[in-house]
Image (cartoon, rainbow, N blue to C red):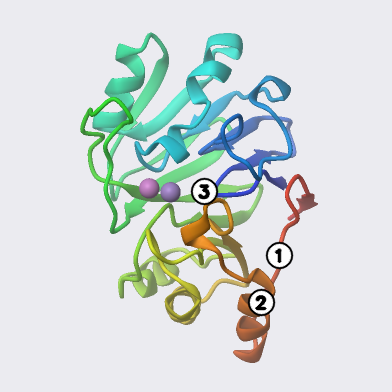
């Protein structure tokens, strides 16, 4: 599988069989995004929660390429109300999709759409694709059950916020890595806005000091996992 980073919490996964999954595509009003929504396609769009910097340009992309949204029930219904296709799930549940398995986890945060609709509980996702497990935590504070998530599914790549203010900062993110024990930690949700400035290289060095691996992805960079 390939993983591409668009800054903030926005990622694109392309499976070995060519299926494209977008997670939280926030591009056109994201000052750090290297591409626009018009540049992307998607077979699936996974939304971790309803905030504007996570729904992002999902509906613009969906109007063009008709992906299947995957979200918790309330947010999936919101997508359906907007005229799109969605697969309703909820926290703790997993499902086998054509790309692999997706399971929603808890996240400690909020979830209301930009137009004021309650989006259900915010979530993280564990994706099991092409023999690897990727845990995108969504927006969240630190919680001890990250240990349980890592015990139930050995995590290869953990994508986690370091920007502080709305989510974990670097100190808490380091504890999250200690708890979930991923093979590789990838920082996200930093530098997009003034209040979430953080140094991803400092995070990487601290992860390495714990004897673990970290990769800082450049905006637009794609790596093969
Ligand atoms: Ni949020
Ligand atoms: Mn956010």
Marks 3 and 1, the one that precedes in the sequence: 3
Residue shown at 22% from the left, 28% from the top:
117
**Residue 58 at what x, y percent from top left?**
50, 25
Q: Which residue is mark 2?
A: 204
Q: Viewed as shown, does residue 113 lie left or right of 52?
A: left
User: In the drawing, what numbered circle is on residue 216?
Assistant: 1
CB atoms at circles 2 and 1 under 8 Å apart? Answer: yes
- Queried on whether the Cβ of the residue with tag 3 lies below 8 angstroms from ligand 2, the answer reads no
* Near-viewer residue (127 or 118): 118
Q: Where, quadrant-wise, is the C terminus in this rendering?
A: bottom right
Q: CA distance from mark 3 to mark 1?
A: 20 Å
The answer to whether marks 3 and 2 mark residues whose Cβ atoms lie closer than 8 Å is no
Q: Is residue 211 above or below residue 223?
A: below
Question: In the picture provided, is 78 more to the left or to the right than 7?
Answer: left
Q: Whole-Å distance between the Cαs marked 3 and 2?
A: 23 Å
The kind of secondary structure element at disc 2 is helix
Residue 67 shown left or right of residue 19 in the figure: left
**Closer mark to the observer between disc 3 and disc 1:** 1
């Amino acid at each position: 599988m390939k993983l591409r980073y668009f800054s903030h919490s926005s990622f694109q996964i392309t499976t070995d069989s060519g299926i494209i999954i977008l997670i939280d595509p926030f591009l056109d009003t994201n000052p750090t995004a290297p591409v626009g929504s018009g540049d992307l396609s998607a077979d699936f769009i996974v939304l971790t929660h309803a905030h504007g910097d996570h729904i992002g340009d999902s509906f613009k992309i969906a109007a063009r390429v008709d992906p299947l949204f995957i979200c918790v029930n309330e947010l999936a219904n919101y997508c359906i109300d907007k005229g799109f296709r969605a697969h309703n799930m909820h926290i703790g549940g997993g499902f086998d999709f054509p790309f692999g398995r997706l399971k929603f986890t808890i996240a400690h945060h909020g979830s209301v759409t930009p137009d004021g609709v309650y989006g259900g509980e915010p979530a993280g996702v564990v994706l099991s694709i092409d023999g690897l497990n990727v845990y995108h935590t969504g927006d969240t504070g630190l919680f001890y059950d990250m240990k349980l998530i890592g015990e139930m599914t050995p995590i290869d790549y953990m994508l986690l916020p370091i920007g502080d203010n709305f989510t974990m900062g670097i100190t808490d993110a380091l504890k999250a890595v200690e708890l979930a024990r991923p093979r590789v930690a990838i920082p996200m949700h930093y530098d997009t806005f003034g209040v979430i400035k953080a140094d991803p290289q400092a995070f990487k060095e601290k992860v390495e000091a714990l004897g673990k691996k970290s990769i800082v992805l450049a905006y637009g960079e794609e790596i093969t996992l």
